[in-house]
Amino acid sequence: MMLNQKNRTSILEYKFLYEQQKQIDEEVSLGIADLTSALQFFKKRVLGQDKKYDEFFFGQSDKKNNLVALSEHAVDNNKDAPTKKIKSLYKKIVGVTHPDRTDKIVSKHLVDILTSQYMLCVDSFRQGNYQNIIMVGSDLKLPVDNEMVKTFVLPALEKITTDISEKKKLLAYQWYHTPEQKKENFLSMYLQSLGFVVKENEIKNAIKNRKGKRKRGQRPINYRKLK
């Protein structure tokens, strides 16, 4: 059965949101690294509240660090076993994108794309994210039907839309998108809202001397490993 126009559009919509989610995840990671660097500056400078400050931002709370928790989100995967159609589509994708099949392709750009699709499908199949397999299959012009879209892509659309909306509310995301000239005021108001007293000149120094700021595309700092 050929895909109807509505379901073709749904796959394209999911692909757009999937790419947007990846970008937001990177921006949240960058925001965490940058904000953490600024907050580290105050560990021994918060007036009379250094222990409370340290525990809130860098200690353990329900086994989760409050900063690390900013980057975490629930992964709501499909826990059901893959259907026969998903298994069949997955095997076809692997047959096209496996490195053993692409090693003779001259175009490095094409090889990179196929390798990325292969890795995404392998991870998605293992994790139960079958909507990603449908997305890749559609990109490769492999057979995808309306039932598969209805079962896996449409529910995923709602989940990814909610996830994107929630991530945009994260402090790290907001920090990343705060203009540099407004970061002092952002940090000052944030710490004051939590009840921490800091000096204006130290806010300026924290912003000026932070080391966590990175450009997009650089590997983020893994704070869980550091701890």
Image (tube, helix red, strand yellow):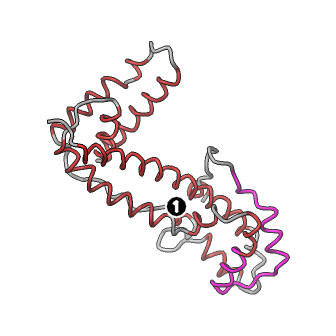
Q: From the viewer's perspective, is 38 left or right of 84?
A: right
Horizontal side of residue 147 vs 119, given as left or right: left
Above or below — where is 147 with respect to 69? above
| Image quadrant where residue 90 sits | top left
**SS category of the residue bearing label 1:** helix
The picture places residue 17, in percent across and down from the top left corner, at: 42, 51
Q: Is residue 139 magenta?
A: no
> As drawn, which residue projects farthest toward the right?
201
- Which span is picked out in magenta? 186-214
Q: Amino acid at mark 1?
A: Ser
Specify whether residue 212 is painted magenta: yes
Which residue occupies 68% across, 60% down? 34
The image position of residue 127, as x and y in percent, is 32, 47
Place of residue 218 in the rendered image (x, y in percent of width and height, measured from the top left): 64, 45
Pointer 1: what residue? 71
Q: Residue at x 25, y 43 (%)?
A: 5
Residue 76 versus residue 44 in the image, above or below: above
